[in-house]
Image: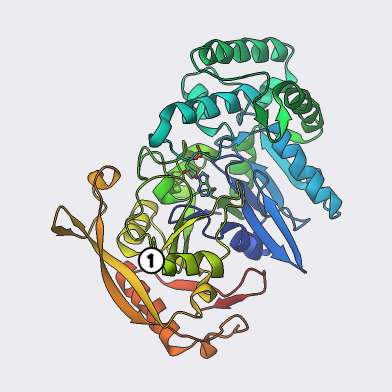
């Protein structure tokens, strides 16, 4: 079998968790391939709401295996909290969860480094989630990192102490009150103790050579969905660098983050919101710094699921969407949060950019440094409540026109429209 991929085409928070959860019954395995607890995948059903940071969104289906791949980075403290949250709802995640031996660990001192680097950046700060993502991936590529498989080995404590010591040496160059700096409301020492307790608990989960498990599963006919985190415009290579995360969030990341060869990639499912949001700093050409933006934030409850920060909101950026379709080889589009636009009489779409008065229809290198002004196209809104619609025949004409316009521009079919946060609020399109 070929592996399908589901990923975000914008700046994250597109609603990937909901769609993975909806699609899970069709797959034997759900596997995360990059990112870490900077992600916050929200899943709602039976009036319950769950936010997953590291555990794949297939965990609610007891017969699906969930794999945390080698490309993911894991903070045991946060992971443990997730296990507890699931357990409180009767879900014993340990039963159908596997962790790659090659996934790197986020140490408490990685989080200190993240905070120190961010505050030293001053006005140029990235707006990091401060979960230690950048420093952990830095240690991975600098060949200093500690991996899940190392926790089972005798020299683990020595490795931990050596790496922590390295971090403390670096931190001496920053004015940081290490004793009193809080991580998730805890002093460093307490956090570190809980981190070690959590690590012990993780030993009860299957820690495997995930690349063998995945390839053997695919070769024996098992189906797999790779679950992306963040979004294409936050990719470390193709996003709005340096205002990006530290991993490859795009299709290519599946090959390195799970060990799946390129010819084994099947469908690429691209998730995008009917409008755009971004949390943290960095370019956002179609951003609305006005009452319309505020209305999108209010109607869409656009506050970060990991940090609680208000998200920046704007209209759909078609140039960026087409770029993401190209980079990822998207074969199907899923449009999320269409219902958030219910009360808008008019909807706008950014169709091209002006860079220094020159009209362009691509995402330029300069996007990271120069302000791009969008050219707008105005479309009629549907101006009606679509939350209860389930059948494509009942889709209002204006929404149908909006979707068809996006299909024509991207050359990719929109297979699903999401009309609310619940698992059931989906319109399938043939
Ligand atoms: P980091 O990945 O925590 O270092 O954050 C780098 C940038 O990516 C910041 O602007 C974050 O707000 C953004 N970011 C990281 N993870 C997510 C996510 O899951 N959704 C949306 N933005 C994210």
Where residue 116 sits in the image (x, y, percent)? 52, 25
**Front residue of 253 and 296:** 296
Where residue 367 sits in the image (x, y, percent)? 27, 47
Which residue is the site of mark 1?
Answer: 316
Where residue 329 sits in the image (x, y, percent)? 38, 56
According to the image, what is the colour scheme of the structure?
rainbow
Q: Which residue appears at 57% of the width and 75% of the height? A: 419
Q: Which residue appears at 70% of the width and 38% of the height? A: 78
**Residue 391 in view:** yes
Tell me if 411 is positioned left or right of 224 in this view.
left
Q: Up-down: is 192 above or below 365?
A: above
Q: Up-down: is 56 above or below 241?
A: below
**Front residue of 307 and 249:** 307
**Front residue of 151 and 245:** 245
Q: Up-down: is 246 above or below 354?
A: above
Circle 1 crowding by C-alpha within 10 Å: few under 14, some 14–19, many from 20: many
Tell me if 164 is positioned left or right of 414 in this view.
right
Q: Up-down: is 367 above or below 358?
A: above
Where residue 86 sits in the image (x, y, percent)? 79, 50
Tell me how many marks there are.
1
Tell me if 199 is positioned left or right of 387 in this view.
right
Image quadrant containing the N terminus? bottom right
Secondary element at image label 1: strand
Q: Which residue appears at 33% of the width and 64% of the height? A: 318
């Amino acid at each position: 079998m070929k592996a399908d991929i589901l990923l975000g085409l914008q700046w994250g928070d597109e609603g990937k968790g909901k769609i993975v959860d909806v699609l899970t019954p069709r797959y034997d395995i759900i596997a995360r391939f990059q990112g870490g607890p900077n992600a916050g995948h929200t899943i709602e059903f039976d009036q319950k709401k769950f936010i997953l940071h590291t555990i794949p969104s297939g965990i609610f289906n007891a017969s699906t295996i969930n794999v945390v791949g080698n490309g993911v980075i894991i903070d045991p403290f946060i992971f443990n909290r997730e296990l507890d949250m699931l357990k409180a709802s009767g879900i014993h995640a340990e039963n159908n969860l596997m962790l790659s031996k090659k996934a790197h660990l986020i140490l408490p001192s990685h989080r200190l480094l993240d905070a120190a680097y961010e505050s030293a950046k001053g006005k140029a700060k990235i707006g990091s989630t401060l979960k230690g993502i950048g420093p952990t991936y830095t240690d991975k590529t600098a060949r200093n990192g500690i991996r899940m498989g190392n926790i089972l080995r005798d020299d683990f404590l020595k490795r931990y102490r050596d790496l922590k010591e390295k971090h403390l040496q670096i931190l001496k160059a920053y004015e940081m009150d290490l004793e009193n700096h809080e991580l998730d409301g805890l002093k460093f020492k307490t956090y570190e103790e809980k981190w070690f307790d959590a690590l012990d608990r993780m030993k009860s989960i299957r820690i495997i050579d995930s690349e063998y498990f995945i390839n053997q599963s695919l070769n024996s006919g098992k189906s797999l969905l790779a679950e992306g985190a963040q979004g294409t415009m936050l990719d470390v290579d193709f996003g709005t660098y340096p205002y990006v995360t530290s991993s490859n969030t795009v299709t290519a990341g599946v090959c390195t983050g799970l060990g799946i060869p390129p010819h084994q990639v099947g469908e690429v499912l691209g998730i995008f919101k009917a409008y755009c949001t971004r949390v943290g700093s960095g370019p956002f050409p179609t951003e609305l710094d006005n009452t319309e933006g505020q209305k999108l934030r209010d109607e869409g409850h656009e506050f970060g699921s990991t940090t609680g920060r208000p998200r920046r909101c704007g209209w759909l950026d078609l140039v960026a969407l087409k770029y993401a379709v190209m980079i990822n080889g998207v074969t199907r589009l899923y449009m999320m949060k269409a219902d958030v636009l219910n009360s808008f009489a008019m909807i706008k779409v950014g169709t091209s950019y002006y860079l220094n008065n020159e009209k362009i229809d691509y995402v330029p290198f300069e996007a990271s440094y120069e302000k791009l002004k969008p050219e707008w196209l105005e479309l009629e809104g549907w101006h009606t409540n679509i939350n209860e619609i389930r059948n494509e025949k009942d889709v209002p004409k204006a929404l149908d026109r909006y979707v068809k316009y996006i299909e024509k521009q991207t050359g990719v079919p929109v297979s699903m429209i999401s009309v609310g946060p619940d698992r059931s609020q989906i319109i399938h399109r043939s």
